[in-house]
Image (cartoon, helix red, strand yellow):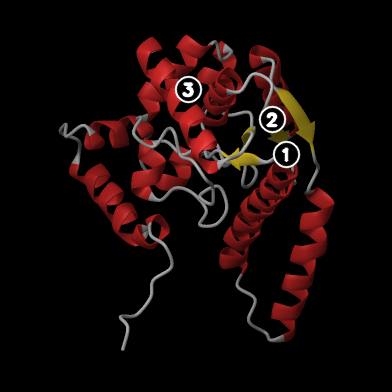
Amino acid sequence: MEEKVTKLVEWLQKQVKEAGLNGAIVGISGGIDSAVVAHLIKRAFPENSLGLIMPCKSNPKDQEDALKVVESCGIDYITIDLTETHHALFSQIESKIKEKNQWNEKAARMGDANTRARLRMTTLYAVANNFGYMVVGTDNAAEWHTGYFTKYGDGGVDLVPLIHFTKGEVRKLAKVLGVPNEIIHKAPTAGLWEGQTDEKEMGTTYDMIDKYLKGEEIPDEDRQIIEQMHKRSEHKRRLAAAPPKF
């Protein structure tokens, strides 16, 4: 893993240099994936890396964990609270849809969560533009394969250094990099709503997805869930679809 860390750092440096930019930025959520990326970009660009902490109707514990990540790698950071911004936008959306009598409570909960992810990415790019930084994503192999990310939200980035690493491998990277143990062993969550965890929402576990990606045997129920998620999310891994030229 030490060798892989070195190669990832070199790759990040190469991508930024080829883009003619100055450094890199990442949104730090308090979870393991963003913690690993924060450590990587700090190693790659000691003087030109930045972490953004962006609470938005968030559990305060997530912000505390994000600050522990900042402390563990020494990265410069900015905190921008998006709660009021999100409320101003989403309350307008809710009001206008309800005027049409088309409000769908279940769909709205996901729309609310995705809007938060897209506000964070908008904020990341606004700050990145100021510094001349590339936006670095945090999706790992399991999330990329199943589409467990928001299109044009946390999936809308310049670089995705972790998409060839399973969740288990990300944990190994985290240990090598010096990510705090409590972050490494924290239950993965996107913080979308009270009590939400990745694995509850997906209906399977990261361990099962990791085994599937490695070609190992897993129960049929888990395999079907993973394959359905992959099929449904194919559009997320592509550029916008276009018809053939007529």
Label 3, label 2: how many angstroms apart (C-alpha)? Answer: 15 Å
Q: Around disc 1, counting alpha carbons within 10 Å, would you say few (fewer than 14), some (14 to 19), or many (20 or more)?
A: some
Residue indicated by mark 3: 9
**Quarter of the C terminus within the rendering:** bottom left
Determine if residue 195 is in view. no
In the rendered image, the residue lying farthest to the bottom is 246
Residue indicated by mark 2: 50
Q: Around disc 3, counting alpha carbons within 10 Å, would you say few (fewer than 14), some (14 to 19), or many (20 or more)?
A: many
Above or below 137: residue 42: above
Q: Are marks 2 and 1 in contact (CB under 8 Å)?
A: yes
The one of 87 and 3 positioned closer to us in this rendering: 3
Label 2, label 1: how many angstroms apart (C-alpha)? Answer: 9 Å
**Residue 217 in which image quadrant:** top left
Label 3, label 1: how many angstroms apart (C-alpha)? Answer: 20 Å
- Which amino acid, by three-letter code, is at mark 1? Phe
Residue indicated by mark 1: 131
Which label's residue is closer to the chain start, 3 or 1? 3
Decide if residue 173 is on the left or right side of residue 216: right
Secondary structure found at label 3? helix
